[in-house]
Structures are given as structure tokens and as C-alpha cells.
Image: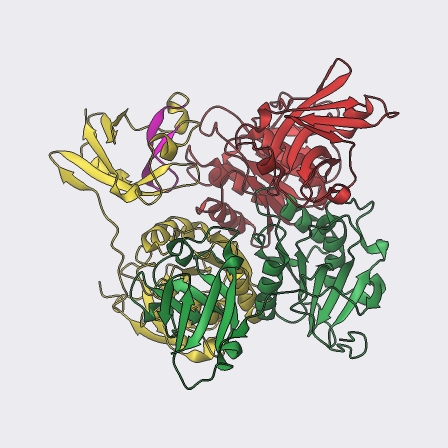
Chain colours: A red, B green, C yellow
Amino acid sequence: MDQGAVSDTKPFTPSGIVTLLTDFGLEDAYVGIVKGVILGINHRAGIVDITHGVVLGDIIHAAIILQHSYRYFPEGTIHLAVVDPGVGTRRRPIIVKTGGHFFVGPDNGIFGKVISGSSRVVHITNRRYFLSEPGSTFHGRDIFAPVAAHLSNGVSYEKMGHFIDDSVPINIPVPRREDGKLVGQILYVDHFGNMITNIRRNDIESLGSESRKRIRIMDVIIEGIADTYANKGKGEPVALFGSTGYMEIAVNMGNACRMFGVEHGEERDIKVIVENV
Amino acid sequence: MDQGAVSDTKPFTPSGIVTLLTDFGLEDAYVGIVKGVILGINHRAGIVDITHGVVLGDIIHAAIILQHSYRYFPEGTIHLAVVDPGVGTRRRPIIVKTGGHFFVGPDNGIFGKVISGSSRVVHITNRRYFLSEPGSTFHGRDIFAPVAAHLSNGVSYEKMGHFIDDSVPINIPVPRREDGKLVGQILYVDHFGNMITNIRRNDIESLGSESRKRIRIMDVIIEGIADTYANKGKGEPVALFGSTGYMEIAVNMGNACRMFGVEHGEERDIKVIVENV
Amino acid sequence: MDQGAVSDTKPFTPSGIVTLLTDFGLEDAYVGIVKGVILGINHRAGIVDITHGVVLGDIIHAAIILQHSYRYFPEGTIHLAVVDPGVGTRRRPIIVKTGGHFFVGPDNGIFGKVISGSSRVVHITNRRYFLSEPGSTFHGRDIFAPVAAHLSNGVSYEKMGHFIDDSVPINIPVPRREDGKLVGQILYVDHFGNMITNIRRNDIESLGSESRKRIRIMDVIIEGIADTYANKGKGEPVALFGSTGYMEIAVNMGNACRMFGVEHGEERDIKVIVENV
């Protein structure tokens, strides 16, 4: 992928919206401070939280959430995404421009699912757009927030650093074919206890569309892929393509994660097998 | 109740504020996506979270919270309320107009405490105001958010569907009289561990105002109804009418829920008895 | 400290921003209601949450968070801070003016770290700026929110009450010198499990700058004060001056609180000893 060659030439007019996606949680002042810094530079910014509940340091979780949420914001939006276990190391701060949206954060794969061949990526080096005296533990405050705020003020990203074409990719496990079956896994569990897998609709189509599907997870068999949670009886497990675009294992009126006894942190060890009946 | 006959004819000027009340939690992107959709339609909407921490699927909890919070917002506010375990079934999406406020969400009783005889209710059917290709698992994003945004832009709700007069009521348990006593129950527990009952001031008045009251809960007796938490000693239980208008069982400087050993999910099995001394 | 004598005469132009810092949590409507009240008085207020996750009733936690966050907001910002276990008692509602910022909340020490010799403090007594019929359990809604909103509208704080010079101080434990060592303690634990101590850089300097430092906490020895988390190997404990300005005990790519087995509520019993090697 040569990110520099085919550039994203869509003109950029700031929408005035800055979104935030972090693993900072909400019990400290970290998120509030980031917002204060942004508002200090652009009083009129409209700041929207996507979430601050990314699993601590989980770049895959952040990358997936960002991928399926950013498109719902108007073009011209700046997305600040900071899940940054390597803060203070040599990992680069970057700006990504993709399809009328800007993304600001660390170059650690968090933007791996929004960077495409036509994206442009800038390594941020111009300290003029940082807070004075940036520290080494909170680049969300010292670098990413002020850069996002200046972008929302209409400052060109080209002034903030130089183009690169070797941004760090993200390595999200993909389902594999095995004996005519599709073997995927859980990626994460949402607030409802729904277990979001790494299986997408076209993965299923690769099994052929003529026959009904059967899903196996742990010792449970789920017959067919449903349209909605209520396709199954109350308390029964259901497999469907949810709002994220990925197959989810859910329980109608219930909590799949709890029903399957999946402990936090084990999700990605759990196989989800799809086969033709 | 004929909701159609006596209509709420108060003119409606959008305040520009859209509130959100859901059980979506904050660890996923669901809330952020709803906000993105709203801002895509009305850039200038002022979006305010009431809470996203409604107990999962608990329509009674949502209905009570909505009832005692919406009045604090200016007239002309749109309130999006989505606790929607029946998403994807035939339950209707509705708009409620009550006293200068609009409410948007599923017709499952969530608006049961804000609908009065003069309210008007519209069954939303006009797909022109939906996101294109609405799915069957996330109507908050696909139907309710865009409808709320269009309302906040001043689009008339009459264009979005047709009036109905059979919206689903809410069945919140009410205290009963038994042997000259009042027998109520806990409805929910708040962040402070205060246990909010279903007993209102006029329920108490029905016992007569001449004598002091005694409250029994589990094996504990609380003498009198206090004005504020500090009417009792530190660590002692207290009964008072809190900010919700309902009687609360609290502990001065402490956590009543923990002191009484009430487990999450058991609240509504716990009786609260009020008697004259 | 004579707060009245040397007054803060910086002129005040509202930035339009009102921040919120409370222990209300996010699962109830309390925060939403406060925002509704503010917006009812100033439609154009930009409301920003610092956090609502202060440890219940923990005024020290709130005072520290406020101290290190308010400066990141533009001058002219109103900071509403309500951790108020004494609500309904005779503790006074106050407004503090410090360096171009206003603070509104209870006079219980929560502003102890932002009040300096040049601050001015007003005891709020003018009921004209309260909600009508304020209750005795939710002054955040009935008194502090409307006062903050009127301040953000440009109403002079002098109209809201009278100056006082005896506001309640905050008693945050400070490190002590013992046998040539510095003995501090944990103040609180953040979302990342980092343990924030009460030791500041100039406390360390008092030990002399010529020699390397050694930190002892529980049975663990940490050699040297690092610049960033990644100065140590993955999973190893590290001591550094974090974004709060206080020394933190952290674990590179890990959770220090969990690694040290510190239970919630025990933090302040844990000693942190710094000595010269």
C-alpha cells in the first residue's frame, strides 16, 4: 500500500466536531482535561465522546470501534483516538486523512482499519501545535488535543509535520477455512453481553449461500443466522449480524457473555465455527 | 384515556437541545454513533446525556428517571429515550408531545409516566426521516436519532406518521393499604446506594397527618420521616422524600444498599412498610 | 490567610464554559438534571464534564482532581464542583474567584487547593439566583447549577451574597521527613491502576539532588525515578512524576493497584518511602 502515491484530495472543511475515543475511563480528570485543552484553542468546538471505555491498552478493540463509528459523523469531523500504551516511547504521533475525516493519535495500529490506499498520513513533528513543554506521560493532553483543536480551526495538516507511507498496520485475527467450515473467534463483548465475532457477512458467503448455516460456540449449537434478537425464544442464544457489521452471539432478552460463562479477558480464546447444515 | 381528543396545542419551538436516556452503557460506540447521526442532520443540536446507565432492559427504571428529569430542561427540548428489548419486533416507534416537550422512542411503556390526557402520540411510519436502510437491531441509530434530529430542526411531527391513542402504558407497582399500614417497595437503587421506593408524599398523607410515622424495611425500624440525610447520626438509616419525589431509604454518610445487604436485582422484592406510631 | 484583603481584581468575561465535577456517578439522572437547569438559564452554555466519578463523599479526591484540571480550561470558565456529604446541614454554599476562574459549590474544603491568598470567596445567600423552592437533598440542582448558570450569563458574583474570609480549608496529608527519608502515602488510584501519591517534585528535591533515589512501597523496591512508563520492562513497577504533578507508582503495560494487591478504600494507609541510595 503506497499511501503517499494516490492521495486523498477531498477538500476539507471542518464540521466543528471533534470526537474522542480513549481508554482513559471517566473516573479521573483525564478526559475533562483533554476537552479543556481543545476548548482553549477552539472555543466553538463541539466535542463528542465516542467512548472512553476501550479495554485498557487494547488497540484492536479501539480500531474496530473506530472503524464502525466514524462514518456516522459528518464529513469534516476530527477524530481523536488515544489508546497509547507506548506513550513516551519512539512511536510517532500521526494525523490520518481518510474520506473527508481526520484522525489524530499514536501510530500504533489504532487507525489500521480506517487507513486505506487513498488515505494520507502525516507524522506530527511541528511543536508549534503542541502544548508548551509536552511531558512524556500524557500526549492526549499535550500533543493530540491541541493538534485536533488546531485542525478544527482549519489549520492545514500539512503544516503539522511530513507525509509518511509506513504507518503501523493493525493485525486483527481473521476467520480461517478449515475442513469446509469457517473458524472465527470472539473479538470483544459489548455492554449488553453480546459477543462480537470477527466474522463478516462475506466470510459467510464464502461457504456458499445455498444451505442453512449452523453455528457452534463452546458446547452450544445455534441453528441459522437470525435477523433480530427476537427471532429466538426468550433466554435462547442467537447469531446475527449486528449493527457493527460483524456476527454477534447474543441471547434474546439476556446476556450471552454471562450465559456462556465467558470471563473478561478470555474472549479472544473462544472459537466460533460456522458450517453448512 | 382518549389521547387524540384533547390535544396538546402548545406551540413548539425547538430549544435546540436533544437529551438521551438509554441502557446502552458508555463502553461501546453506541451512544457516540447516535450523537453522530443527530449531528449529521442538525449540526447545531446541543446533545445532553440524561443517563445511559438504565438497568438493562428495565423499562420501569427508565420511565421513572424520565418522569423526574425531563421537566428540568427548557420547553422545546427533544428527549430520545431508548430502552428497547423488543427492537426488531412489531413494537411501534413513537413520538410523544407533552407540555412543550417531545419524546422519541419505542412504544413499550417507557413514556408511560410522561403521557397524560392532553399528550399527543404519533406512530412514526414515514421512512423519509429514517437513516437509509434501517436494520433490525439498532433503531436508536436508524430511526430514533434521525427523527429526533429532524424534530430539533423544526420538522413537524405530524409529517412523520399518524396519531394513535392506544400507546402502551407502564405498569409501575403502587403501594397498597393493608391493616391501616402502607406497604410499598423499592423501585431501584441509585449511585449513592439510596433505595428509592414507590411511595410518594400523598400516599403517606392517606395515612393521616396527625401522627408520627414509623418505617419498617427488612428487620430495621426507622422512626419518622427526615428532612435531610444529616437528620440522623452518621451511619444511621434515614427515610426522606428525596429529589425524585419518592421516599428514599438512605444512610447518613453511608450506603443504604450495602448496609441492608440488598443484592442487585432483588430490589423490587423488598417491602417498605409505613405505619402510624 | 486574609482572603478579603488582597483581592483578585482580574476582570471576568465568561468563556461560556461550565465544567462539572461531582461524585454523582452516571447511572442516575442527577448529572443530566444539573445540565438541564443550567441550560434552562443559559441556553448557550457549553457544559463539560470533568468527572462524576469522584470517590463517594471524598473531598480530598475532588480537591486534588480540581486542582490539576481547572487550569487547562480557558479563563472565564465556571467550575461547578459538588461532593457534598453535608448537604442540608449548615455548611455554606460558596463562589470562589481565582485567577480568572470561578468555582461554585459547598464550603467543605473542596476548593481548598484552588483558593490562594488573592482569591475572593462569596457566601451565596441571594435566593433570587436559586431554583424556586430549593430542597434539602440536592443543592447541585437547586442552588449550585442555577448560580453557575447565572455567572456564565455574566451576572456579577457580588450580587449573589457577601464576601467571607474564613472558608473551610482542606487537610491533605503531606509527606514527612523521617531519618533522612521522605515518607509519603497513596492519595488515590486512577483508571489505569496507577497509584497517585502525595509526593511532589520539590519534596524530592528536599532530599538533595546529588544522589539517585530509591522508592519503597509495601515490600517492593523501585530504583530511580523514571521519565515515562516504558523506562522499565513490561510488567515492572515504575515511579515517575505523572501528568498530575504528583509521583505515581505505575506498572509498565500493567495495573499497579492490582499488582500490589491494594484494595479499594485502603489506598491512604499505604506508605511510599523515598530515600537516597
**Is residue B142 located in the magenta-colored stretch of the structure?**
no
Name the foreground residue: A124 vs B250. Answer: B250
Name the foreground residue: A110 vs B95. Answer: B95
Please say if B201 is above or below B105. Answer: below
Q: Residue at x 51, y 81 (%)?
A: B206
Q: Residue at x 42, y 86 (%)?
A: B210
Q: Extreme right residue here? A: A210
Please say if C161 is above or below C86. Answer: below
The N terminus of chain C appears in which quarter of the rendering?
bottom left
Tell how many labels: 0
Residue A161 seen: no
Quick check: B148 left or right of C206? Answer: right
Q: Which residues are magenta?
A: C235-251
Residue B101 seen: yes
Please say if A77 is above or below A2. Answer: below
* Residue A100 pos. (x, y %): 72, 39
Quick check: A258 left or right of A5? Answer: left
Magenta stretch, main secondary structure class: strand
Q: Residue at x 36, y 67 (%)?
A: B221
* Residue B259 pos. (x, y %): 37, 55
Q: Quadrant of residue B20?
A: bottom right
The C terminus of chain C appears in which quarter of the rendering?
top left
